[in-house]
Each structure stands twice: as structure tokens, then as C-alpha cells.
Image: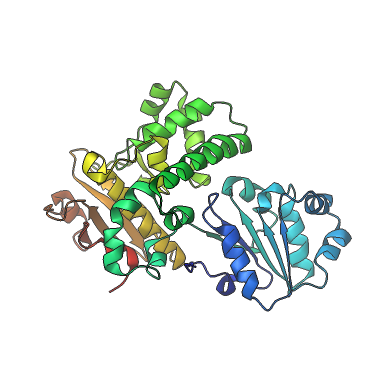
Amino acid sequence: MIPRLLQIEKLLKPQKVLIIYGARRVGKTTLLKNFLSETKLKYRLDSGDNIRVQRIFDTQDFNLILEYAEGYDLIAIDEAQYIKNIGMGLKILVDNNPDLKIIATGSSSFDLQQKVGEPLTGRKRTFILYPFSLKELRSKYNKQELKDKLEEFLIYGMYPEIIITKNKKEKVEFLKELVDSYLLKDVLNLERIKGARQIYDLLKLLSFQIGSEVSLNELATQIGMDVKTVNRYLDILEKAFVIKRIGAFSRNLRKEITSKSKYYFYDVGIRNAIISHFNPLEDRNDVGALFENFIIMERIKINAYKQEFIEYYFWRTYDGQEIDFIEVTNGKIYGYEIKWQDTASYRIPKAWKGSYPDTKVQLINKSNFLKFVLDEE
């Protein structure tokens, strides 16, 4: 078993509901059950798709809900997004059982947020469980092995089932099934989206624009939708842990681009499945984009698990000077240029040096990436 960096025992607090979000099949249920198998707390585990549990919480009946939790130290509800009034029900439990600990997991953050957001204001702690990170795989592989497996990670991604599956054909089948069942069914059904073909076409366009600024107007024109609908679909896909938006960094210099965004995929295996492209790296022309996506998401994972508040950006001027990835934390700015080739040369842009002379910009490539994404000295 590969231990996860998200450790439930350290995150549980009385009078705070622990909510764990994440895409389908990233390991939320496994994480929860592993914790419960070791805890000394007396617990009750239920699933949100249990009709009886749904009925109890739907009633919003204080006595019925309190009776549900009576005698337990911990209540754990997996796939909580299926319960209509889950937020109010959990609020009743928190407010009337000061020592009770509660965990709720959900695959669809936009759906679960709507149900728990307002009722649990000030009463919840939320965390995202990502596909495996290299930091987590460090317990299974040494650094050289991680480097040797980089091509495999860039092609098939980091979902738990991908990591434990040896056969390449089975990896591809898993990813395609995940795209078809989750992206094209669950996401569409949850938001009652009718344009399945359009949202799939949108994802395909984003797949070919990794690392590039995205124009909503261009996307809308290519797909045949209005800009408002494209923007809504992008928001849904981000909240469903499919894509991650990175905005432009600017301190209001006239020559800096501010209006556009870049979109990366939470998992590059999902991206490759969307365009059905699983060729070896030597037969691809998108290796640089894949590597950039992979590195940025690995960095976001490690920072999230460290519970550090960091803002993420890219930087570009109208004359083409750019830095791939910017982190802003505690008032400090850090820049990173990501290049696949370890022989690639890099000079810090003049406009950046002139505008932000006290910041550092580091080149990340396939020779030194491990130190960056493992956050090790």
C-alpha cells in the first residue's frame, strides 16, 4: 500500500466537518477505509447513495438525525454529494454533538459545495485528494526509479489504478473508461448539460493548448457556442477536477498580459485519453507541453498537502517575453521556466528583471525536476 500525504487522523477536529473532495477513482474511499481500519474511535460508515441515509438527512428532523449518530465518536459518509440536504444535516450533528468527529467525501466539488457551503460556514475544513503525487510514490520507488518512470507518468498519468496496473493496454482501457463514464456522464448529468459533444470538443481544444494562453472567444467560435456558455463549461470542468486554471500575473505594467488564462489537466493521462494519444515520447510533438503540465500539477499537489496558501500564475508580455509558472506566497514571488530538454538554455526576460529585480527565476528540466516536485533539499 502506498501511503497518502493527506492524513485524515491529523486533519480531524471536533466541531469541524472534514470534507475531502477529489475526482472519481483518485482513492478517496480507499483513504477513508484505511483510516477507519486503524482508528480506535467508534465509527459509523455510510455511503451517500444509500437511500435510507438519504431519507434521514432529507427530513432535517433533529431527533432523527441525532438518533442516527447516537453512541458514535465518528460519522463517516462516503460520496456525500448524493444526499440532498447533507449540509444542514451535518450542521445539526456538529451543533448538537461537540465531541463528534465527522468526515464527508465527495467526487463533485461543485455539487457538494452547493450543499454544504452555507450551512457549514465556519464548521468545516476542506481538502482535495489528487491522483498520486511523486512525493507519495517516493515510498515505493527511489529517485532513479522515478526518473526512469517519467515517460510512463507523462503518457498514462498518476491515477492509483494506473500506478498499480502493469499492462499498458489495461492502462489505456482504464483511462478511456474513466473519460467516458465520468467526464461524459457524471459531469454532464450533475449539471444537466445537454451539449455532450460540445464539452468534449472543448476538452479536445484545451488538450492541444496546454501551456498556451486560451482565448474564450476563439474557443466559442471553434465550438459554435457563446462565450458565456464556454466560460460556464470551463468553470464546471475545473470544479470537477478535470482542468486547472492558471491566471496571468501582473503588477499593472502596461506591457503585461492580464486578461487571458492557461488551462492544465489535473492528470495528463486523462488529457491523453481525451485525444486518444498514447504514443511513446519519441513519437510525439507535445512532450514539452506534457512535461510542463505534469510539473505544474505535481508542484500544486505538494503545496496543497503541505497546507500552504500559494497563488499560481504565468507571466507574459505583449512582445512575447514569458515565464511559465509563478508562485506568490507571503508576499514573495518565485518564477519557474519549465523545459523538457536538459540542455536548453534560458535567460531571464529583461522586462521581468527590470520590473521584479528582487525575484528569482529557476529553470526546471528533466535533470533537476525531482528536487522541485519532491520539495527536498
Q: x, y percentage for residue 23?
A: 53, 50
Comparing 358 with 137, the one in front is: 137
Is residue 343 rendered to the left or right of residue 268?
A: left
Is residue 44 rendered to the left or right of residue 138?
A: right
Q: Residue 104: which quarter of the image?
A: bottom right
Q: x, y percentage for residue 206?
A: 38, 36
Which residue is at 21% across, 44% downward?
Answer: 282
Quadrant location of the C terminus? bottom left
Rendered view: 295 above or below 138: above
Is residue 229 rendered to the left or right of residue 82?
A: left
Is residue 350 rendered to the left or right of residue 184?
A: left
Q: Is residue 253 visible?
A: no
Q: x, y percentage for residue 193?
A: 58, 30
Q: Residue 92: which quarter of the image?
A: bottom right
Which residue is at 41% across, 39% downward?
Answer: 273
Q: Is residue 293 visible?
A: yes
Comparing 272 with 111, the one in front is: 272
Q: Residue 274: which quarter of the image?
A: top left
Total marks shown come to 0
Rendered view: 106 above or below 196: below
Q: x, y percentage for residue 53?
A: 79, 54
Comparing 199 with 276, the one in front is: 276
Rendered view: 149 above or below 316: below
Which residue is at 29% across, 52% downward?
Answer: 151
Kindly give the residue lying farthest to the bottom in the view shown.
40
Which residue is at 38% across, 23% downward?
Answer: 222
Q: Report the coloring of the rendering.
A: rainbow
Kindly give the residue lying farthest to the right in the view shown.
63
